[in-house]
Amino acid sequence: MAGPFCLLAGRFGFTTLSERGSVMMSERAKGVAAMIGACSIWGLSPIYYKLLSHVSALEVLSHRMIWSLVIFAMLLALQGRLREIARSMNTMRSFGLVVVAALMIAANWTLFIWSVQTGQTTQTSLGYYIYPLVAVVIGRLIFGEQLTALQWLAVAMATVAVALLTFGPGVAPWIALTLAATFGVYGLIKKQLNVGPVVSVTGEVLLLTPFAVIILLQTYHNGGAVFGGDLQTMVLLVFAGPITASPLILFSYAARRLAMTSLGLLQYINPTLQFACAVFVFSEPFGLWHLIAFSLIWSALALYSAASLRLESTRRKAARAAEASGTTI
């Protein structure tokens, strides 16, 4: 009976449950692959910025903005979506939000580039490990989201880890905290914008590009510009566009196909690869205090992930129960 039923279903445009499941799994697999690709590019990007250690962080940032704007604008033009940039900033509130988001991402990018160039990639990886827990705190303080006991414990463990890194080596991990805070505020702002990630980032770099041009002109005027010198540096600086745009495009693709829990868990690939670059590629110092603090952070993220998975499972069970009973939630 299965064969004729499948033929009839195909004849009248229906799909069987197994076919739907296959399609869904295929889309989910594509989403996972895209997210792994995005996080791998982000996580391995310190190697790229290390190659540009002879270029000032502000000059690298300026090229990153300009060349990524070119790619984003071309992409939106091909999709016929350039007008969405203006619509994303057509009110004073939305314009103000984009301005704040642009400032946060500029600060985050500048600090990240400078930290990698000066041999502090360990701190950048710590910052992006801490970020999910900062996002949890922001959700509690700003949106009144309730935290489970495990989530509170995870936040407490992260706090202890930061304290150990401060009082152990005697220097506060300000780079990690600033990266986590700026990206946390950036995520908060993005939550208020009713546009997709590509459109919003295009608007942000569009606002920042005039400043990038001024920085490059001033650098050139002072005789310190490297663009136009050796071919390798020129190619690397232009490549700042693809290395900025491609992971965001992949992330946007994945976000439409994966649950938030899956996105959150896969994002840990980014700081893990950064950490690997710092310790195994750049041979940055990693002492006992770092080991204890990172162990606490990793344990905190494990608890946080377990809590997130439990909440997601509870929501799915509630949704299935509501669907079975014919009610809506």
Image (spheres, rainbow, N blue to C red):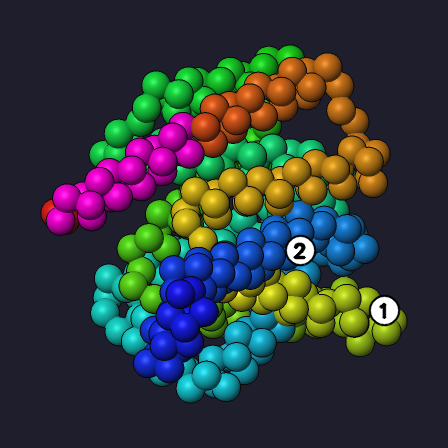
The picture places residue 207, in percent across and down from the top left corner, at 44, 69
Residue 247 on image: x %, y %: 59, 60
Q: Please state if 136 lies on the left or on the right of 170 as rendered.
A: left
Mark 1 secondary-structure assignment: helix
Residue 249 visible from this viewpoint: yes
Question: Looking at the image, is 232 positioned above or below residue 165?
Answer: below
Instruction: Look at discs 1 and 2 and give the one toward the viewer.
Output: 2
Question: Residue drawn 52% across and 79% down?
Answer: 75
Quadrant of the image containing the N terminus = bottom left
Q: Residue at x 68, y 21 (%)?
A: 290
For the residues labelled 1 and 2, the Cα–Cα distance comes to 20 Å
According to the picture, the residue beneath numbered tag 2 turns out to be: 41
* Range drawn in magenta: 307-326
Q: Which residue is mark 1?
A: 232
Pick whichever, 298 or 274, lies toward us.
298
The vertical placement of 196 against 25, above or below, is below
Magenta-colored stretch includes residue 320: yes
Out of 310 and 3, give the one closest to the viewer: 3
